[in-house]
Image (cartoon, rainbow, N blue to C red):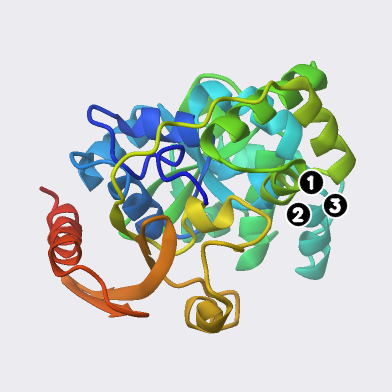
Amino acid sequence: MRSVEAQLLHRPPGLTAADVVRHLTAIQAQDVPSALLAFRARSATLTPSGIEAAWQAREIVRTWGPRGTLHFVHADDLPWIHTLTSSDAAALRRLRQEGVTGDDLLPLAANALAGQGPLTKAELTERLSGRARGQGVVHLMALAAHHGLAVLGPSRAGKPTYVHAGDWLGAPVVPEPDRGKALKELAVRYRRAHHPATPEDLAAWSGLPLGEARAAWRTSAAQDPPEPGEPVLRLAPAFDEFLMGWRGRDGVLAPEHAAKVFPGGGVLRPVVLAGGTVAGVWSRKGAQVSVQPFGELPEEPVRAEIEDVRRFLSGR
């Protein structure tokens, strides 16, 4: 069974937002509200404003990471993560589909961002003077990010922003030149936060070719699993690392309930984790939280988790 302790779901005291990100290596952040709730599931004291402060302080950074998906990562980890996860092939392909072409795309993106601070897509569209619109702007920013020139800034009125990496971080992101060193770091970090796991799990999570993931695995020593504690119940958000961090969901999600968690269309619903397995799904509308269990659940832990989600969403 997967270790909730390795995933910090036992909520050890005193963790900062930067601590949580650094331990997990990356927190999927395609959807920022869900990413914030992933912090809540691992800390009894973090608040949205505290996570935002870490983002504003450049301790954590939102950028394209494992699998080419947006993640929060620790600023100190950007160089080696960039070495292993950055490829501009997908961004270039999507830009061609959007009709954004030319041999000046990197300078175009960098010049639109330089010295401006975080900009929304609408603001960038204006600065690009018609060279890119709609999703073309997003893919242009992804191209810049894959070359270390851009990251995402804090959201503004619920909209993502993009910022020149040199302006936001003090310098563009320079990849770690020693790929072997980066691979070893990845394997050590992954094995620390994912137990039990295999090289195949690492490949699926990171997006690396299986052969390279196996080579990375061989450079890292097996780590003693965390001491198991008391069973915990958590309301984990959509796309939580506890489900996304392995190749499959065997052992944590019964097949008869899979369609309730993965209804199709790329949707992964928020889940109730009880004793390290998926025991239900949940949803929220404003501050109202609704739990749909797959079977009987203990009332008090469910009530406490609902109240804690409300606490978090209220900013307390």
Q: Would you call the spot at circle 2 few (<14 residues within 10 Å), some (14-19), or many (20 or more)? A: many
Q: Are marks 3 and 1 in contact (CB under 8 Å)?
A: no
Q: Which residue is mark 2?
A: 91
Please, is residue 3 above or below residue 94 in the view? above
Q: Quadrant of residue 87?
A: top right
For marks 3 and 1, the one nearer the N-term is: 1
The x and y percentages for residue 39 are: 34, 45
Q: Name the residue type under label 1.
A: Asp
The residue lying at 37 percent from left, 51 percent from top is 38
C-alpha separation, residue under disc 3 versus residue under disc 1: 15 Å
Q: Which residue is mark 1?
A: 88
The x and y percentages for residue 24 are: 49, 36
Q: Quadrant of residue 190?
A: top right
Q: Which mark is residue 248?
A: none
The x and y percentages for residue 273 are: 37, 61
Q: Is residue 98 visible?
A: yes
C-alpha separation, residue under disc 3 versus residue under disc 2: 14 Å
Secondary structure type for disc 2 = helix
Q: Quadrant of residue 305?
A: bottom left
User: Relative to the observer, which residue lies in front, 268 or 5?
Assistant: 5
Q: Name the residue type under label 3.
A: Gly
For marks 3 and 2, the one nearer the N-term is: 2
Q: Are marks 2 and 1 in contact (CB under 8 Å)?
A: yes
Q: Which residue is mark 3?
A: 102
Secondary structure type for disc 3 = loop
Please state which of the two labelled residues, at mark 3 or mark 1, is closer to the viewer. 1
The residue lying at 60 percent from left, 68 percent from top is 134
